[in-house]
Image: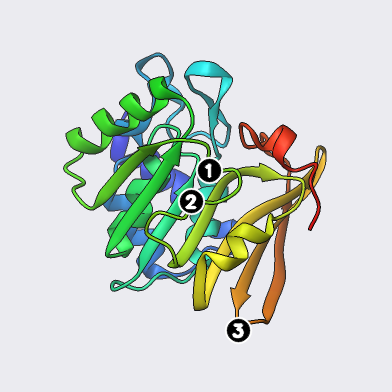
Amino acid sequence: MNIEQARFNMIEQQIRPWNVLDQDVLDSLVVVKREDFVPDAYKALAFVDTEIPLPGGEAMLTPKIEARLLQEVQLKKHENVLEIGTGSGYMAALLAHKARHVTTVEIAPELKALAEANLARAGVTNVTVELGDGAQGWSKGAPYDVIVISGALEELPETFLKQVKVGGRIAAIIGRAPVMSAQITTRVSETAYDTVKVFETNVQQLKAAVTASRFTF
């Protein structure tokens, strides 16, 4: 397989048609090598429009969803990011390429170790991988400029709203299978939030969110 040709095809045939046209985001997809974050058994699927299995029953999001979320949060170089659900570390690496620092929280020790190894091998130095349950947010280091939740929630817990700065954005996939929508929530003032639905999708639910999301605020 010609890896660079496969990467080019992924960007041109999957990513661009999904309205990902921000050149910075497209450049990130070239610089951050997706194949370095895919388990060895699935290397051949690194650029395919499919979820890739990870240990513990988890999965990498499809490339187009990762790219679209990256575009929609409109990251800036000085910003600090919180990611919930590290997985293989690929989304954290994409975020880190555009941000000052990324704190990513993973509930599974096996995936935390995998992500740390992948990030180190890829030379990514501005990511901290934390072990814990981030389904209700992560107060350490808050408030953040951007929060990305790499797994679905039935609803967005209020704790996340408190952990983003005024002007900050939260990317979350909200709903219950098979009907979910990716949403960008912007904190426009101390008390006000603006939420925009950006696309429909269906992804795995965030671990531990299965029980946590029953509570309403």
**Can you identify the residue that label 2 sits on?**
138
**Residue 106 placement, left or right of 179:** left
| Horizontal and vertical percent position of residue 83 | 46, 50
User: Is residue 60 or residue 49 the one in the foreground?
Assistant: 60
As shown in the figure, which amino acid type bears the numbered disc 1? Gly
| Horizontal and vertical percent position of residue 150 | 55, 45
Q: Secondary structure at mark 3?
A: loop
| Horizontal and vertical percent position of residue 133 | 52, 37
**Residue 78 placement, left or right of 6:** left
Question: Depth-wise, is mark 3 or mark 2 nearer the camera?
Answer: 2
Verify CB contact (< 8 Å) between mark 2 and mark 1: yes
As shown in the figure, which amino acid type bears the numbered disc 2? Trp
**Can you identify the residue that label 3 sits on?**
188
Q: Residue at x 50, y 39 (%)?
A: 85
Q: Secondary structure at mark 2?
A: loop
As shown in the figure, which amino acid type bears the numbered disc 3? Val
Going by the picture, which residue comes out furthest to the bottom?
A: 189
> Mark 3 or 2 closer to N-term?
2
Going by the picture, which residue comes out furthest to the top?
A: 41
> Mark 1 or 3 closer to N-term?
1
114 above or below 84? above
Residue 187, by quadrant, is bottom right
Q: Callout 3: 10 Å neighbours few (<14), some, many (20+)?
A: some
**Can you identify the residue that label 1 sits on?**
134
User: Is residue 208 or residue 121 the one in the foreground?
Assistant: 208
Q: Residue at x 70, y 39 (%)?
A: 212
* Mark 1 → mark 3, Cα distance in angstroms: 23 Å
